[in-house]
Amino acid sequence: MKCAASLLAVTLGFSLNAAESPELLKQGQTIPLPGVKGRFDHFSIDAKGNRLFVAALGNNTVEVIDVAAGKRLHSIPGMSKPQGVLFLADRNELLVANGDDSTLKFLDTANFKVKHSLPDMPDADNVRLDPHSGATWVGYGDGALAQVTSGSYKSAATIKLAGHPESFQLEKQGSRVFVNVPDSKEIVVADAAKHEVLAKWPMKQFQANFPMALDESNHRLFVGCRKPARLVIFDTEAGKPVADLAISGDTDDLFYDAKRKRIYISCGDGFIDVVEQSSADNYQRVAKIPTAAGARTCFFSSDLDRLYLAVPDRGNQKAEIRVLKAQ
């Protein structure tokens, strides 16, 4: 009984401390999105233009937010289960991966009109920019990453995978791309320049690996899992996990704040978990910030020191973007 009481005290102590940690992420603006129904997916940002782009998957729109004024600028209709979005500043383009009509759409962000649609990408999902070539990578289908070269509207190369790719991250100091493939219970490591698979890291103990972030300076990869709810940290040189810790359930996004050595994890259970990195191999959850049920997608801008959380329309809770400032 004494051990059980001590454990309860520790648990309650953690909860109270987490609730009393607003200095980590300070609540700022709340930006309402009236009329937006269904769940949200991924984000992109135009930091210089103060525009946030939000894939409103369930609403078949992309919502454009003025983050300086704290209001919606525009709602882009005509999308088809939009999942991934990517803003390209040099071309003033917004790329939107549409899961239902199997297209990658290219929009002019001056007028939000579609310039081109690249077809044959079923369940088009995450979109990332290759920091070396300037190409765009798109995860889609039953298992592939497609490379779309800069300035073109064609798929130039493909990396085949054993299942649908979820989050993936590209190195800035190397040519590797790390890919979450939850259907095949693995992380795939590929060479983005040579378009070939280099390694497969099994995910047997911790599965449903969806979100991912990269700390390249410390050679660490952060992977969010749902079964069970854990954050798993991999050594990208050894290709092995070095740590793992419990997190809140139903995570879909996580970001690494290199300036503060923190990881922000948005979870559909209704929390943002904040994990502190004290060294490359040591991590502790230092806050569990209450949000809203289903609010599992977010975006962290290191340029603006802001975390943007998408809250879906559910019952009495209306759709909105919550802005939290990293302290």
Image: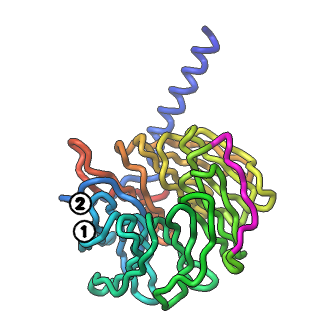
Majority secondary structure of magenta residues: strand
Answer whether residue 199 is magenta in the image.
yes
Residue at the extreme top of the image, as rendered: 1
Q: Secondary structure under badge 2?
A: loop
Identify the residue shown where x is 59% and y is 60%.
Answer: 213
Q: Is residue 132 above or below residue 186?
A: below
Instruction: Return the residue at label 1.
Output: 72
Residue 125 can be seen, yes or no = yes
Instruction: Return the residue at label 2.
Output: 33
Name the side, left or right, on which 263 lies relative to 233: left
Identify the residue shown where x is 73% and y is 62%.
Answer: 218
Residue stretch rendered in magenta on the structure? 196-206
Q: Residues within 10 Å of mark 1 (few under 14, many from 20)?
A: some
Name the side, left or right, on which 29 lies relative to 172: left
User: Which image quadrant: the N terminus?
Assistant: top right
Q: Is residue 91 above or below residue 268?
A: below
Query: Which numbered disc flags the more N-terminal residue, 2 or 1?
Result: 2
Please identify the quarter of the rendering in which residue 315 is found: top left
> Which amino acid, by three-letter code, is at mark 1?
Arg
Residue 130 position within the rendered picture, expressed as x and y whole percent measured from the top left: 59, 78
Residue at the extreme right of the image, as rendered: 238
> Which amino acid, by three-letter code, is at mark 2?
Leu
Identify the residue shown where x is 47% and y is 44%.
Answer: 250
2 and 1 marks in contact (CB < 8 Å):
yes
Q: Secondary structure under badge 1?
A: strand
